[in-house]
Image: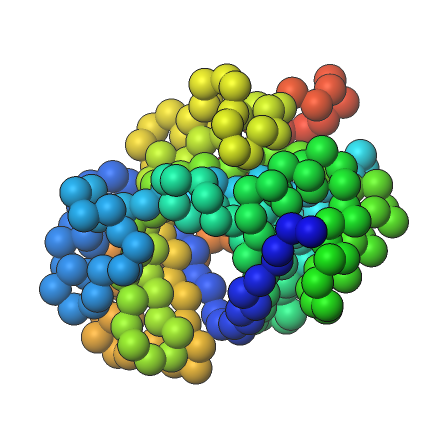
Amino acid sequence: MNSIVGHTSIIRQEYKYYISFQTYLALKSQLGNCMELDENANRTSSTYKVRSLYFDNIDQNDFNEKVDGIYSREKFRIRSYDESLKVFKFESKKRIDLAIKKTSETLDKKTVDSIISGNYEELLLKDSALLRRAYGKLKGNGYKPRVIVEYDRLAYRLPYNNIRITLDLNLRTYNSCINLINPNIASTPVFKDNTQILEIKFSGFLPSHLKSLIGKFTSSRNSISKFVLCQQQISHGPWDDLIDKPF
């Protein structure tokens, strides 16, 4: 029996912005002076690669709920945060009004392979409310692995209020390939103009000095979904409408 261990859950606010590469460089310089670099960062690049596989059904329910702005929604993904691709997390990202709740369970590589192949019964091998709920939705509503989302993340943190600021670079996907562990095609960049993504995440409140710093480099927030942006790169059929980036 494959092991599934390591439960985590967190609720916080998330603010998202499109930024230029020049703004990324400026923020990188200033955030490094007032926040801690994420402990998982590569010592050379200061970033780490995030690769996620999202699920959806034939009607693209999760995609459409995000595009339509449905307030209460939940989507599931399998994610790797390290280059070795040895440890994975099965994650729920659930929106509850203005807050985001992220819950996760650790998976091993063999379990991930089995789930991607359609063996959702693997999700029932542990007494986990998250995995039972995921099994019910994925199995009961015809969900299948849908799209890989990949980017390079520069992350900073503070040791209170779950504060994290991330600069997500080079957003890319693999078209219809769903082989999370070893994609067999070249990745496709989502943006052609060096656009990057800034995310500010916190529980409770954000310190005034960070508000002031972020305000120097950003204007209006955007409703950004990497899942949606990467799904738009897949050729589903001639009846699908493309959705422009919401500047």
Image location of residue 65, percent across then percent down? 71, 50
Image location of residue 244, percent across then percent down? 54, 34
Which residue appears farthest toward the right when viewing the image?
140
Kindly tell me whether residue 69 is visible in this rendering: no
- Residue 99's place in the image compared with 214, above or below, is below
Residue at image location 18% in from the left, 48% down from the top: 43
Tell whether 79 sits left or right of 189: right
Residue at image location 20% in from the left, 54% down from the top: 27
Image location of residue 162, percent across then percent down? 39, 74
Tell whether 83 sits left or right of 66: left
Image location of residue 186, percent across then percent down? 45, 18
Residue at image location 55% in from the left, 57% down from the top: 106
Residue at image location 69% in from the left, 41% down from the top: 115
- Residue 96's place in the image compared with 237, above or below, is below
From the viewer's side, name the closer residue of 219 and 177.
177
Which residue appears farthest toward the front when viewing the image?
1
From the viewer's side, name the closer residue of 155 and 31.
155
Kindly tell me whether residue 8 is visible in this rendering: yes
From the viewer's side, name the closer residue of 26 and 74.
74
Residue 101: image quadrant is bottom right
Work out which quarter of the rendered image holds the C terminus and state it. Answer: top left
> How many numbered callouts?
0
From the viewer's side, name the closer residue of 189 and 46.
46
What coloring was used for the rendering?
Answer: rainbow
